[in-house]
Amino acid sequence: MPKDMDALLRGLAGREDRVVALQSALTACPALGPDNGGDGEEAKAALITQWLEACGVTDILRIDAPDARVPSGQRPNLVARIPGKEKRTLWLFGHMDVVPPGDLAAWQSDPWQVRREGDLLFGRGVEDNQQAITSMLLLAEELHQRHVVPQLSLGLVFMADEETGSAYGLEYLLKTAPELFSKNDLYIVPDAGARRGDVIEVAEKGQLWLKIRTTGVQCHASTPHKGRNAFLAGADMALACHNGLRAAFGDTNTLFNPPTSTFVPGKHEANVPNINTVPGSDVFYVDCRLLPQVDPQAVLDKVRALASEVEERHGVQIEVSVVQQQAASSVAETSPVVIALGAAVARVYGVEARTLGIGGATVAAQLRQRDLAAAVWSCLASTCHQPNESSSITATIKDAQVFTHILMNPAHV
């Protein structure tokens, strides 16, 4: 093993306290986007910038996406670069925004204060996506402290807005500064994975989010015959989507888990504030995750056909609109980044990595759509968006060691 890489690996192995410190500071800085009732990522971006500057990173580019909904008027995106012996760059991506904690009663402690139990840290964002951010910062700090010039150059991207579509995050960055990224570079998104670290995500289902608005006639609940219950019709429509779409698009693909397309009625907007009123308007949303062979337009056409049937049954009007759409994406299992990850994972975690497709959407999709071969990998327990979200200190360090192997030993790529 080369001397510099050995020093980096040994140095990282002793950074447990630093992991706790970084995660504690990040968690105490809630970065909720405006769609989730927050002020954005400005404070967290300032914190990360301070850490990068403190460990000697001088090449820090900030690209702000204008957003009048947040106090600062902007959503920050940071690009930090550490030059290596080669221009070819290993890019790592972490998103700064988090989701709301949800039901506080379901948490065993304050979600915005890190709680430690042995190797585990608990708090909102510690896994999604602060484990990645912490691993990235650990690697930058260790390179600086050891005065090591890596073989490959290192690019660290800290993004806004991943949780609500990335329009102000990586999508904005790729549109305004595409010259940053070369097809010859390596791209890793540490935002999904498995508990043993043995899964490399190489494909993502297509994403189609639908808003379904039902319009009926409001009336007093004691005389329901005088109205048209939009909530009741909306519930019928939700069941029609759940059952009808699964029946119509039942193809399977064993690369993915689950191996089918999924159609999930989820978010529901408030209708009337009182019990004794039949609502005349009702809105809910459907999250569709589509296998690559499923045509999103065919799904939309089917939803509208189901809506016509529900309209006739209930005497209401139903409007179906697209909230967000993203095409399915994939990277070849033989691509250099997948091969490099497999070799590094074997050395650090002692397991043979397997490739898999997922239904969740990561920013790897935006990279792949621009012909940038991105793989998604991390060692995660997959507690994101749950109460008592957790992250392993050991996995955070070992993830940084995996990146170190690739950064310092490009012979594998």
Image: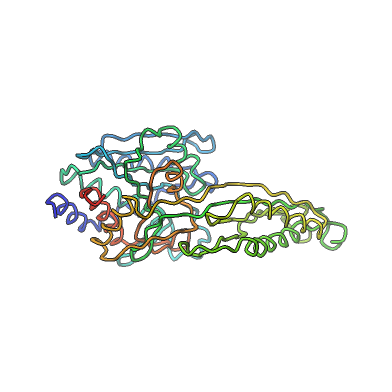
Q: Is residue 106 visible?
A: yes
The colour scheme used here is rainbow
Q: Position of residue 356 (x, y in %)?
A: 42, 60
Query: Could you say which is closer to the camera, residue 136 or residue 351?
Result: 351
Determine whether, in the image, residue 99 is placed left or right of residue 194: right
Q: Position of residue 283 (x, y in %)?
A: 69, 53
Q: Residue at x 33, y 62 (%)?
A: 353
Farthest residue in the left direction?
3
Vertical position of residue 392 compared to residue 39: above or below:
below
Query: Could you say which is closer to the camera, residue 144 or residue 119?
Result: 144
Q: Position of residue 44 (x, y in %)?
A: 39, 44
Q: Residue at x 44, y 43 (%)?
A: 160
Determine whether, in the image, residue 54 is placed left or right of residue 266: left
Q: Residue at x 25, y 58 (%)?
A: 16
Determine whether, in the image, residue 268 is placed left or right of residue 386: right
Residue 83 falls in image quadrant: top left
Q: Position of residue 173 (x, y in %)?
A: 43, 37
Vertical position of residue 386 compared to residue 323: above or below:
below
Query: Could you say which is closer to the camera, residue 8 or residue 57?
Result: 8
Q: Is residue 24 visible?
A: no
